[in-house]
Image (tube, rainbow, N blue to C red):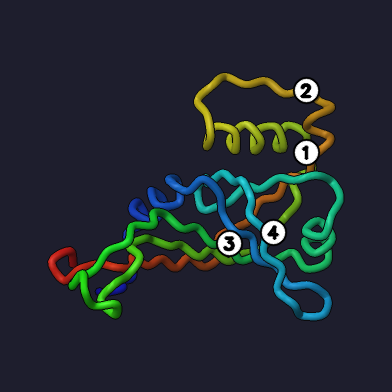
């Protein structure tokens, strides 16, 4: 099975778009990794995230506003020879995004980002109150580095 690098921006963005969540990786004050699943939206090289106003990830993002995000699209067990364990692989695509994080504080920008995030999950026309917008943290991650791979490809699929 082969692993190949994905370089086509449309293919990378399509893989991100198929993901139901991403994994947000941060580093705490002791240098220990901290990784949590997050809902997200993707637009024009930016990832948008939201959460409550308090908690460990809020503290970590305020202290060190950089992040690593992992997206994984698909998980299909594939093999070259059914009876050979070493020929098995998990067919999937992964995208790693690294970048600077900035808090979105302008109410209109927050609302736009939250609606963008909701559009990732539903096509319903949604409303949100000003109180709801004020009650959450919203961040923009500027994608400074994007790497992507396709795993578990058979030679005939390359």
**Viewer-closest of 24 and 99:** 24
Q: Is residue 93 left or right of residue 4?
A: right
- Asked which secondary structure carries label 2, the reply is loop
Please, is residue 66 above or below residue 105 in the view? below
Q: Earlier in the sequence, mark 3 or mark 4?
A: 3
Where disc 3 sits, the SS reads strand
Which residue corresponds to mark 1? 106
Task: Determine which residue is flagged by label 3.
Answer: 69
Q: CA distance from mark 3 to mark 4?
A: 11 Å
Q: Name the quadrant of the C terminus.
A: bottom left
Image x and y of residue 118, in percent: 59, 33
CB under 8 Å between discs 3 and 1: no
Which residue is labeled 4 in the image? Answer: 101
Q: Earlier in the sequence, mark 3 or mark 2?
A: 3
The tag earlier along the polypeptide, 2 or 1, is 1
Q: Is residue 154 above or below residue 134?
A: below
Label 4: few (<14), some or many (≥20) within 10 Å? many
**Which image quarter holds the N terminus?**
bottom left
Assign a secondary structure to mark 1: loop
Mark 3 or mark 1, earlier in chain? 3
Q: In the image, residue 22 lies at what x, y percent?
A: 56, 54
**Distance in Å between CA atoms under marks 2 and 4:** 25 Å
Q: Earlier in the sequence, mark 2 or mark 4?
A: 4
Residue 119: x, y in percent? 54, 32
Q: Is residue 148 above or below residue 103?
A: below
Alpha-carbon distance for marks 1 and 4? 15 Å
Q: Which residue is mark 2?
A: 129
């Amino acid at each position: 099975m082969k692993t190949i690098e994905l370089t086509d921006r449309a293919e990378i963005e399509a893989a991100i778009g198929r993901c139901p969540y991403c994994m947000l990786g941060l580093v705490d004050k002791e240098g220990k990794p901290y990784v949590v699943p997050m809902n997200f939206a993707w637009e024009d090289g930016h990832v948008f995230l939201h959460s409550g106003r308090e908690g460990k990830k809020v503290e970590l993002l305020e202290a060190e506003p950089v992040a690593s995000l992992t997206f994984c699209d698909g998980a299909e067990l594939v093999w070259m020879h059914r009876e050979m364990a070493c020929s098995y692989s998990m067919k999937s695509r992964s995208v790693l995004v690294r970048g600077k994080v900035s808090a979105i504080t302008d109410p209109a920008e927050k609302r736009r980002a939250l609606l963008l995030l909701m559009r990732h999950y539903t096509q319903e026309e949604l409303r949100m109150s000003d109180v709801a917008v004020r009650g959450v943290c919203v961040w923009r991650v500027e994608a400074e580095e994007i790497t992507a791979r396709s795993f578990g490809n058979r030679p005939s699929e390359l």
